């Protein structure tokens, strides 16, 4: 019985020691360090097979030197795709949005 109690206590300790930031909404700032504007930004969980909607929206671009902050609601690790005005794309797979801002270079 004592062994079972120790094992259960260790399991509870492991569960409570997990980082809470992975579950909470958190900001992600994307900075355009390129020489041309970004037309589309797609952000999706790493386990998704779909890029989803354009987070900039149809009437906005991110000009060189500008930054934008989004709220991520689905965990820290995300796949991010940025599309420039000339349709060149930059992809960052499994990017840790809890730890880093994304600086995009062409």
Image (tube, rainbow, N blue to C red):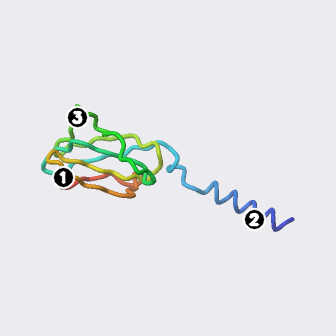
Foreground of the two, 13 or 34: 34
| Structural distance between the alpha carbons of marks 3 and 2 | 54 Å
At 30% from the left edge and 52% from the top edge, which residue is drawn?
102
Q: Are marks 3 and 2 in contact (CB under 8 Å)?
A: no
Identify the residue position indicated by label 2 in the image.
7
Quadrant location of residue 55?
A: top left
Mark 1 burial class by Cα count in 10 Å: few <14, some 14-19, many 20+: few
Disc nearest the viewer among 3 and 2? 3
Q: Residue furthest bottom?
A: 3
The location of residue 75, given as percent across then percent down, is 47, 49
Give left or right: position of 71 versus 105: right
| Structural distance between the alpha carbons of marks 2 and 1 | 53 Å
Figure check: 56 above or below 44 = above
Q: Are marks 3 and 1 in contact (CB under 8 Å)?
A: no
Query: Helix, strand or loop at disc 1?
Result: loop
Query: Helix, strand or loop at disc 2?
Result: helix
| Structural distance between the alpha carbons of marks 3 and 1 | 17 Å
| Disc marking residue 60 | 3
């Amino acid at each position: 019985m004592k062994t079972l109690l120790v094992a259960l206590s260790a399991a509870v300790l492991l569960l409570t020691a997990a980082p809470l930031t992975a579950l909470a909404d958190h900001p992600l700032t994307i900075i355009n360090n390129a020489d041309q504007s970004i037309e589309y930004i797609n952000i999706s969980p790493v386990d998704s097979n779909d890029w989803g909607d354009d987070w900039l929206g149809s009437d906005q671009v991110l000009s060189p030197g500008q930054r934008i902050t989004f709220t991520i609601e689905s965990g820290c690790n995300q796949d991010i795709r940025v599309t420039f005005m000339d349709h060149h794309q930059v992809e960052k797979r499994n990017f840790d949005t809890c730890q880093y801002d994304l600086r995009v270079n062409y």
